[in-house]
Structures are given as C-alpha cells and as structure tokens.
Image (spheres, grey):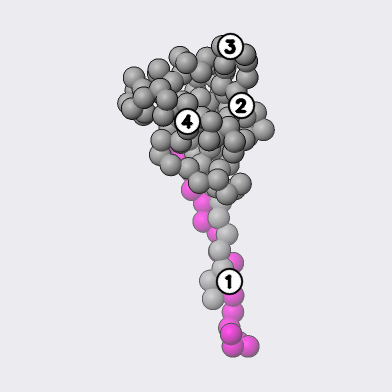
C-alpha cells in the first residue's frame, strides 16, 4: 500500500421490521454463525419452532414437525435434535417422557417487544 493512500472507516445501518418468527430465526442464525456451527434450513426451522414452542415433549414436537412438512419422519427429526444437542443448541431432559428446548445459554429472546438494530463498520481504501 502506498504511503499516501487514505483509509476511511464507513458505517452502514439497517433497521427493518420483523415478526416474532423472523426475529427468532435471525437470533439463532447469528448465534450459530458466531460459534461457527453450520445450519441447514431444516435445522434452522427446527430451532425456530423450538424457540416458539418453548419446552415441549419430544414425541409431540417431532409429530408437529412432520405435520408441518419440515421432516419426512419423526425419526429424522429425532436424529437432527440429537445432532443439535451434541452442538449444545438444544437441551433434552427427562426419563421416559423426554422434553426438549433451546439451550438457555444461547440467550434467544422469544417474548416481548424485540428490536434489532444492525450496524456494520467497514474500511474503504
């Protein structure tokens, strides 16, 4: 780079209205990106549904995901849940009747008025 080259810092800002489901999906995407966990569309839909439902029974959740067309079978849903549990995105608890929910450490806000203000800084040479 030449001695007389100037570098400028520029900012961009974006405000956009999002409904509850979109805001949750956005938070999940950002969280997974920051911890370098790749997400398929199916996994994202599963995590979003879990956030919307809260703590729920595993069997009923898998049935709901098949009914909504996200998964072809309950077993494929359970397989994805197990994979996401290993990535610390989902918590599974219980003995005979298992319950699943988003890992609270993700800090995904699901209730109340949620606003997102995105700011980005970049350099121009």
Q: If you read the primary sequence from the N terminus, does the residue marked by circle 1 or circle 2 appear first?
A: 1
CB contact under 8 Å: marks 3 and 2? no
Q: Secondary structure at mark 2?
A: strand
Tell me the number on the disc at residue 91.
2
Does the residue at mark 4 contact the one at mark 1 (Cβ under 8 Å)? no
How far from the left and from the top, in percent, is residue 100? 56, 21
Q: Is residue 121 magenta?
A: no
Looking at the rendering, which quadrant does residue 37 occupy?
top right
Tell me the crowding category of disc 1: few under 14, some 14 to 19, or many 20 or more residues within 10 angstroms, Cα based: few
Is residue 19 something that shows in the picture?
Answer: no
Gap in angstroms between the C-alphas marked 3 and 2: 16 Å
12 magenta-colored? yes
Query: Is residue 28 something that shows in the picture?
Result: yes
Q: Earlier in the sequence, mark 3 or mark 2?
A: 2
Q: Is residue 68 left or right of residue 62?
A: left
Looking at the rendering, the stretch of residues picked out in magenta corresponds to 1-17
Residue matched to label 3: 96
The residues tagged by marks 4 and 1 sit, at their Cα atoms, a distance apart of 48 Å
């Amino acid at each position: 780079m030449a001695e007389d080259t100037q570098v400028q810092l520029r900012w961009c800002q974006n405000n956009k209205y999002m409904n509850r489901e979109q805001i949750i999906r956005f938070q999940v995407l950002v969280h997974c990106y920051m911890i370098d966990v790749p997400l398929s569309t199916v996994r994202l839909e599963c995590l979003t549904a879990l956030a919307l439902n809260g703590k729920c029974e595993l069997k009923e959740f898998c049935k709901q995901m098949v009914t909504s067309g996200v998964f072809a079978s309950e077993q494929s849903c359970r397989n994805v849940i197990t994979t996401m549990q290993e990535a610390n995105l989902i918590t599974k608890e219980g003995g005979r009747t298992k319950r699943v929910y988003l890992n609270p450490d993700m800090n995904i806000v699901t209730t109340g008025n949620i606003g997102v203000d995105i700011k980005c800084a970049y350099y121009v040479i």
